[in-house]
Image (cartoon, rainbow, N blue to C red):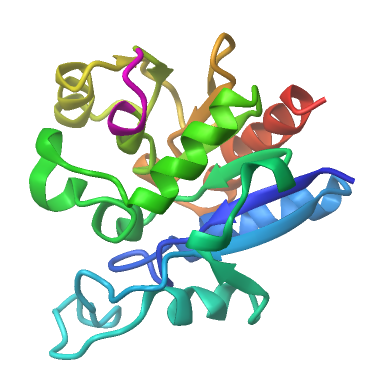
Amino acid sequence: MKKVGIVLGGCGVNDGAEIHEAVITLLALARHGAQAICFAPDKNQADVVNHLTGEPMAESRNVLVEAARIARGEIQPLSEARADELDALIVPGGFGAAKNLSNFAQLGADCTVDEDLKRLSQAMHAAGKPQGFICIAPPMLPKIFDIPLRLTIGTDIDTAELLEVMGAEHVPCPVDDIVVDEEHKIVTTPAYMLAQTIAEAATGIEKLVTRVLVLAQ
């Protein structure tokens, strides 16, 4: 049974992991007979957003505690993740990827990535193990690796141009497809960067999971 690390940036599209993307990933892995092992950084969120109104809330929440909602409590601190215990790694999107796993939302091309995620991702790559990044998670890749990677966030021109500035090769991609950097075993898909429905998001995410597991053979 393949063991796949899932890194969650909290719980909720506006300030954490995109719940649909995370759950579709978990379901796809289960249907392929793979074991998902969830991780999240044990730190405070960058902000807290009321998902009913879209307005910020004057409180603080812990990323790991919030992500545990999605994982039904079966989750570990990201600092404890080890590449030698995993066969692959997948990072769903949501603003948690751009606010908590990195500060891309705040700093754009000058962003940095959570050190534990960076360490884990680099170790996975060094071991030749595949990785999937979904939705707004791919912009972290140029800050993790000092190598040009083929990736996608869909068709958003402004974000695509920013990724090119950061050193990536952006490949336009429809919502139901994936972009694969075969050399570096990196798979990306737009998901809710383009999706209008959960079904649209699911098609690309399921393709990503399938390809990541094939690359993990």
Vertical placement of residue 22 versus 207, above or below: below
Regarding residue 195, the answer to whether it shows in the image is no
9 or 87: nearer the eye?
Answer: 87
Is 111 on the left-hand or right-hand side of 97? left
15 or 77: nearer the eye?
Answer: 77
Q: Residue at x 14, y 28 (%)?
A: 158
Is residue 146 found inside the magenta-colored segment of the image? Answer: yes
Q: Residue at x 49, y 52 (%)?
A: 197
Q: Residue at x 62, y 62 (%)?
A: 38
Is 206 on the left-hand or right-hand side of 14? right
Residue range corresponding to the magenta coloring: 142-147
Q: Quadrant of the C terminus?
A: top right
x, y percent for residue 16: 36, 66
Vertical placement of residue 31 versus 74, above or below: above
* Residue 47 image-quadrant placement: bottom left
Vertical placement of residue 57 versus 177, above or below: below
Is 26 on the left-hand or right-hand side of 31? left
Vertical placement of residue 201 versus 68, above or below: above
203 or 84: nearer the eye?
Answer: 84
Is residue 171 found inside the magenta-colored segment of the image? Answer: no
x, y percent for residue 84: 70, 41
Q: Residue at x 35, y 42 (%)?
A: 193
* Residue 178 image-quadrant placement: top right
x, y percent for residue 177: 55, 26
